Amino acid sequence: MSTKEQRERIELLQGTLDLLILRTLLLGPAHGHAIAKAIEFRSDDVLQVEQGSLYPALHRLIKRGWISVQDGTSENNRRAKFYRLTARGRRQLAVETTKWDRLAGAIARILMPAEQEGES
Amino acid sequence: MSRRKRMMEDLDQDIRDHIERETQDNIDRGMSPEEARYAALRKFGNVTRVKEETRAVWSFVWLEQLGQDVRFGLRTLRKSPGFTLVAVLTLALGIGANTAIFSMVNSVLLRPLAYREAQQLYLVREIIPELSQTYPTLPANLPNFRVWQRECHSFDEVAIVEPFNMTLTGHGEAEQISGGRTSANLFDVLGVIPELGRTFLPQEDTPGSDQVVMLTDSFWRDRFQGDPQIVSRSITLDGKPFQVVGILPASFRFPKGAQWGAFIEFPPRTDYFKPLGLNAEQLEQLGEFEYAAIARLKPGTSARQALAELNVIQGRIAKDAKEGVGLRAELIPLESEVVGTARRGLLLLLGGVGAVLLIVCLNLANLLLVRVPSRVREAGIRTALGASRARLARQLLTESALLAILGGVLGVGLAYFGLRWLVAVAPANLPRIDEVHVDARVLWFATLISLLTAILFGALPAWRVAHAEPQPALKAGAVTITEGRPARRLRESLVGFEVGVGTLLLIVAGLLTTSMIRLLGVDKGFTTERVLAVDVTLPAQSYTKLEQKEEFYENVLGQVRALPGVKSAGWISTLPLEGQGQVNFINVPGRATKDVLAPTANYRYVSPGYFQSMGIQLRRAA
């Protein structure tokens, strides 16, 4: 792991992890390790999740009823806990995504103001 | 509960699987098994903390941890009994003193008078500008009161009351009982509802129908054993039958002494009230300024508006009277008048015990800081096992809280017994001192200052332990480590601060003591050593003639003088420093001064032997 790589990785904002988990599970049920891998892979390794922090987040989502957990067998025929998006979780994902879009848009507008500022 | 347990078991399995998968991935990427496992663990993070955070999702984890912290804290405290004893005892003293003084502040200053909407009640005092040099304000005058009652629209109602003593006979030994003679509406104005029976009726103000009394709860219990049958029965006062119409509630208190302003002196004990019962003639003649007048303002009327209206009325009264003097009035909030100057003294006292508690805190903080190095070692081990800094700090704060709670419980006990002593030695003129006791508000206060104390003396040591570098402590092994220079400097500045607060306290205490000693040393002009005083009042109905009284007084004096051990004896109408006695005008023959403006003097009547008994020296003899 080079220092350059580390510098380019971003610590997750509080609460964003929940959104990422929900989004990942939209593709289908998955076990914990697979979720962590998916988040890293799909963000081109930019988002570095301390894998352990996934578990408190998963349990928080279970408690809120946004995901459920059940036993299943993994790709290499081993028993594993599979996390699955519930109907409420699906709705919540839509809400959270809209919120995130608005937040990201607002921040982008502040960080990259329109050209007129450069001219004045 | 069961769901949580199941979830936590699943979590263990899940985490094991997770790390195994990650290890397998790493091996697939070409790492050695050992390397692969190590990398997987590193990537996963602190397993203990993950488990704890997950458990926190499912439970009141803080409650469990609190239980652990308390058990651990108690063990630690038991291991150093000397420190624990000193800490708990000093805390008990500090918290106890604060609780006791707060109880007094609570009863005297904070708890409202037990009257309905007491903030609407005002004392009405009169002002004669021409006399205000000598008498800034005067008690109310009866005819003026009658005018206010008729004409002042800012008042919801106004009542007057004056001190009045009577002799109770027919119930065991004859006894002089003290209380007040009042307009019938007094209890309506105060908003006091009787415990039994009723208050006075308007028609009971008139002579002939005024032979009714209301008794205070304490007098009723002491003298009539709380017998409810007494209501509507008759008792004999000054030889006449009076019907008991009501009993006042136990919470009823009547301000005493000079709490009604100068020149009215209510006795320390209130036994009863009776209506004024004055006839029209008595009501209309220019009376004395001798009544306490209490007005209840109409809702929404400010004191300033009421006073403006009252002063207009006063101006008209003065003009009609043609005495050649002005007349004004003053409205004083009843609550502030009752509490009066006690406020400053009590708050000073509260500040004093607060400073003592601060010293206790600083002292304990220092003691705890000395113990920091040894705690850092223990903290180092716990950090290595996965404890977070917040958790370490919480553990130490729990220990402080335990000390404070133990000290607080002991302190409340001290305060409870201390209060009895304080009330016993407190100056009798401290308003509402008889109402002082430990109530729910006082207990809340004690709890609050205990916890505040814990934070105050525990925060700094806890922070230092939690933020200390654990490695040097662990490396040092069994060798004891000493505190660094910054730590020593911190402790030294704490000691400095402590000495500063202590000095301040000493200075204030010294100043107060000096004033007290000066006050004791003032030459009063009489001596009280080896002098006894007895109060005597003759029942009016048995001693109607002057000669009878004279004979009685002569008789008593003669017999007292004959007692062995008595050197001298004498009578005086009012003891020194016991109020005004009689105030009369001095009329110089041949000089015509308007009556009201004539010079006044304070008279006391004495018998032979009085000056000798009191050791009063003559300045010059003719």
Image: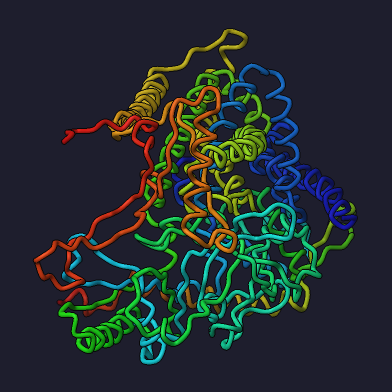
Where residue B67 appears, as percent x and y from the top left, is 75, 40
Name the image quarter holding the N terminus of chain B: bottom right
The residue that appears at 34% across and 78% down in the rendered structure is B303
Q: How many marks?
A: 0
B102 displayed left or right of B511:
right
Please name whichever residue, B456 or B500, is drawn nearer the observer in this view of the structure.
Answer: B500
Q: Report the colour scheme.
A: rainbow
Q: Is residue B203 above or below residue B524?
A: below
**Residue lying farthest to the top in this orientation:** B479
Q: Residue drawn 61% across and 19% down?
A: B83
Residue B427 appears left or right of B235? left
Q: Is residue B330 visible?
A: yes
User: Quadrant of residue B242 in the image?
Assistant: bottom right
> On the rendered image, what quadrant is the C terminus of chain B found in?
top left
Out of B162 and B79, give the one closest to the viewer. Answer: B162
Residue B154 point in image, percent of width and height? 38, 87
Residue B172 in percent (x, y) is at 74, 54
- Name the one closer to the observer, B507 or B575: B575
Decide: is B254 above or below B214. above
Who's the residue at 78% across and 74% down the image? A86
- Residue located 9% across and 66% down the image: B590
Residue B500 in view, yes or no: no
Residue B370 placement (x, y as % from top left): 51, 19
Q: Is residue A29 left or right of residue B2?
A: left
